[in-house]
Image (tube, rainbow, N blue to C red):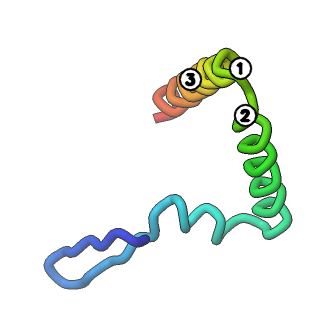
C-alpha cells in the first residue's frame, strides 16, 4: 500500500511503513522477525486469557516508553 500526495506540480508516492520498513531491512533480519512473530502467534494462540492479558499490558508499557522517547526526541 502506498500513500499519494499531490502538490501543485507533481504527484509524490510514499510507501506505508508496512512496506517501507521491510524494504530497507536486511533479509536475514526480516526472516528473524517473521520467525519470532510466528512463534509468538503460536505461543499466545494456545495461552490462556491471563497470559494474553499480561502480554498486552507489557506491550502497552513498551509502546508508552517508545512514545515518550519519540516525544522527547522531537
Q: Judging from the image, what secondary structure is the residue with disc 2 in?
A: helix
| Residue toward you, 68 or 44 | 44
- State the CA–CA distance, disc 1 to disc 2: 8 Å
Asked if disc 1 and disc 2 are in contact, CB closer than 8 Å, the reply is yes
Give the residue at mark 1: 51
Q: Nearer the viewer, mark 1 or mark 3?
A: 1
Q: Is residue 55 above or below residue 17?
A: above
Labelled disc at residue 60:
3
Q: Residue at x 56, y 23 (%)?
A: 60
Q: Position of residue 37 (x, y in %)?
A: 73, 48
The local crowd at label 3, few if under 14, some if 14 to 19, many if 20 or more residues have their Cα within 10 Å, is: few
Q: Residue at x 34, y 69 (%)?
A: 3
Q: Residue at x 52, y 33 (%)?
A: 70
Q: Is residue 56 above or below residue 70?
A: above
Labelled disc at residue 44:
2
Pointer 3 or 2: first along the chain: 2
Q: Position of residue 20 (x, y in %)?
A: 55, 66
Q: Nearer the viewer, mark 3 or mark 2?
A: 2
Q: Judging from the image, what secondary structure is the residue with disc 1 in?
A: helix
Amino acid at each position: 500500500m502506498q500513500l499519494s500526495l499531490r502538490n501543485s506540480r507533481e504527484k509524490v508516492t510514499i510507501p506505508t511503513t508496512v512496506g517501507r520498513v521491510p524494504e530497507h531491512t536486511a533479509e536475514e533480519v526480516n526472516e528473524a522477525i517473521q520467525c519470532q512473530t510466528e512463534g509468538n502467534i503460536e505461543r499466545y494462540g494456545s495461552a490462556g486469557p491471563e497470559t494474553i492479558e499480561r502480554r498486552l499490558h507489557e506491550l502497552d508499557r513498551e509502546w508508552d516508553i517508545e512514545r515518550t522517547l519519540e516525544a522527547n526526541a522531537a
